[in-house]
């Protein structure tokens, strides 16, 4: 958006040192250089025409700030409360599966980055490090477990038992991925469900650093938390992920939410809500929070963006449960806009993944640092000292000043 038409020639930083990344866009350029095409399409892709994905990034551009000036902002802070505990900023590292394909031990490295940034980390059911490994790698991290329901009830019951034992302080049920969105660009690199095309496999050899640090030294990652539930002949990387997808019951419903609520006594959050009726229903179902999310535009295409729903959702929720949004956050100003429109925190997916792919834990930490620094600057420029002072009065919908 900030680019002029080719003059002067501008380039994002795409070297190896994450400290030289100025913005998330630089970490993205670094990730694009390091990752093979099939992994990059997995990271970047949305469903079908990617309309939902593009909308959720562009929705932020519809809102402009009306900053207050001559306000003493010398003591500004982003510190806030997330599910009853303090955090350095209103941000959660959102759950993402297959992190091990982007960087070996990606889950543990993201957790370490979250610990350093003093924000919660949500580990996906489709992660590659065990939850116990993550807990050991980042002792003290606010560790949450994201549940995909698959197979019979005994599987999610066992995962909840383990998550509790591993010290996870909250459970996140993803509600909008029982049928998998068709990420066509990712599929174009595969033959069927269980292997890469010859071209995609050969292309991965042209990324020697990624190749040497990942498949060559460690093989393809495994879905360490759930692999024992997968039939023995389906346990290879691609086959296992297809098997889980094929075994997610499409009968998942509010009854399942009630069953899980009964069993899990710690904070419980629903992720994947995108309509006002479901926000109402969630409040009544006894959960502690909802995440407005289209799964980064990877599920149903052509949805509204989570940001679009925020003001209405805040009206419904009041202060009864926590309200989060996830999708499209690439700037500190995005975070502030979401909070001003009613979010208690934003959940970020690709931003830390760009950092992880670019440079492991240091890259992921750099992504969170960039977002924090940008938000700290912007909040001051906006004439605000604390996150709870943010509100819709500071925003105008494009072209419509209040
Ligand atoms: C590569 C990738 C993998 C993801 N895997 C999961 C997952 O396992 N569970 C889940 O609830 N959401 C998953 N998501 C969705 C994210 O948690 C998050 O909602 C989304 O990425 C937000 O959009 P953003 O990437 O623009 O920040 C994934 C997203 C990406 C990009």
Image (tube, rainbow, N blue to C red):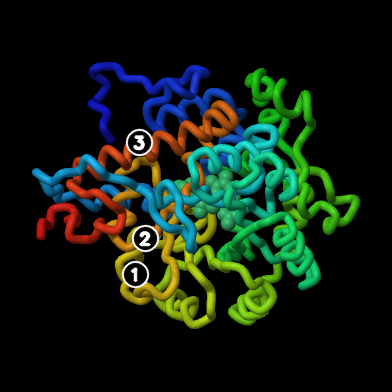
Find residue 57 and report its horizontal and vertical position in percent.
37, 48
Residue occupying image coordinates x 59% and y 40% = 110
Provide the residue designation for mark 1. Answer: 314
- Quick check: marks 2 and 3 in contact, CB under 8 Å? no
Q: Is residue 73 or residue 147 the one in the foreground? A: 73
Which numbered marker is on residue 140?
none
Q: Is residue 175 or residue 140 the one in the foreground? A: 140
Provide the residue designation for mark 2. Answer: 343
- Quick check: marks 1 and 3 in contact, CB under 8 Å? no
Q: CA distance from mark 2 to mark 3?
A: 19 Å
Residue occupying image coordinates x 66% and y 79% = 262
Q: Is residue 183 visible?
A: no
Find residue 175 and report its horizontal and vertical position in percent.
57, 67
Q: Secondary structure at mark 3?
A: helix
- Quick check: marks 2 and 1 in contact, CB under 8 Å? yes
112 displayed left or right of 373: right
The image quadrant of residue 37 is: top right
Mark 1 Cα-neighbour bin, 10 Å: few <14, some 14–19, many ≥20: many
Mark 3 Cα-neighbour bin, 10 Å: few <14, some 14–19, many ≥20: some
Q: Secondary structure at mark 1?
A: helix
Q: Is residue 188 or residue 259 the one in the foreground? A: 259
Q: Is residue 358 visible?
A: yes
Find residue 104 and report its horizontal and vertical position in percent.
69, 33
160 displayed left or right of 15: right
The C terminus appears in which quarter of the rendering?
bottom left
Provide the residue designation for mark 3. Answer: 373
């Amino acid at each position: 958006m900030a680019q002029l038409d080719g003059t002067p020639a501008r380039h994002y930083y795409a070297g190896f040192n994450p400290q030289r990344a100025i913005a998330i866009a630089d970490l993205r350029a670094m990730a694009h250089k390091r990752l093979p095409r099939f992994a990059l399409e997995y990271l970047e892709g949305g469903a079908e025409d990617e309309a939902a994905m593009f909308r959720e990034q562009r929705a932020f551009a519809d809102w402009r700030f009306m900053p207050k000036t001559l306000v003493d902002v010398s003591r500004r802070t982003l510190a806030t409360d997330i599910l009853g505990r303090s955090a350095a900023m209103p941000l959660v590292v959102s759950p993402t599966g297959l992190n091990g394909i982007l960087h070996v031990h990606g889950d543990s490295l993201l957790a370490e980055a979250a610990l350093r940034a003093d924000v919660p980390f949500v580990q996906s059911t489709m992660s590659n490090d065990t939850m116990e490994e993550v807990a050991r790698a980042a002792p003290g991290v606010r560790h949450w477990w994201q549940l995909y329901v698959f197979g019979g009830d005994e599987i999610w019951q066992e995962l909840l038992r383990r998550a509790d034992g591993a010290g996870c302080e909250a459970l996140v049920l993803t509600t909008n991925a029982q049928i998998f969105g068709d990420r066509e660009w990712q599929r174009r690199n595969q033959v069927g469900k269980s292997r890469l095309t010859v071209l995609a496999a050969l292309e991965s050899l042209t990324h020697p650093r990624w190749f040497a640090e990942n498949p060559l030294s460690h093989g393809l990652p495994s879905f360490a938390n759930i692999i024992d539930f997968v039939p023995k002949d389906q346990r290879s990387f691609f086959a296992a992920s297809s098997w889980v997808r094929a075994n997610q019951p499409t009968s998942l419903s509010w009854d399942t939410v009630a069953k899980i609520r009964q069993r899990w006594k710690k904070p419980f959050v629903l992720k994947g809500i995108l309509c006002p009726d479901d926000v109402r229903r969630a409040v009544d179902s006894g959960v502690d929070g909802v995440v407005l999310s289209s799964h980064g535009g990877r599920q149903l295409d052509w949805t509204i963006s989570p940001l679009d729903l925020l003001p209405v959702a805040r009206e419904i929720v009041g202060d009864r449960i926590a309200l989060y949004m996830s999708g499209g956050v690439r700037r500190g100003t995005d975070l502030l806009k979401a909070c001003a429109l009613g979010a208690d925190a934003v959940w970020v997916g690709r931003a830390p993944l760009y950092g992880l792919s670019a440079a492991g834990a240091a890259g992921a930490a750099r992504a969170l640092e960039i977002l924090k620094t940008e938000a700290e600057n912007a909040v001051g420029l906006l004439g605000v000292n604390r996150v709870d002072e943010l509100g819709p009065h500071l925003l105008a919908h494009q072209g419509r000043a209040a």
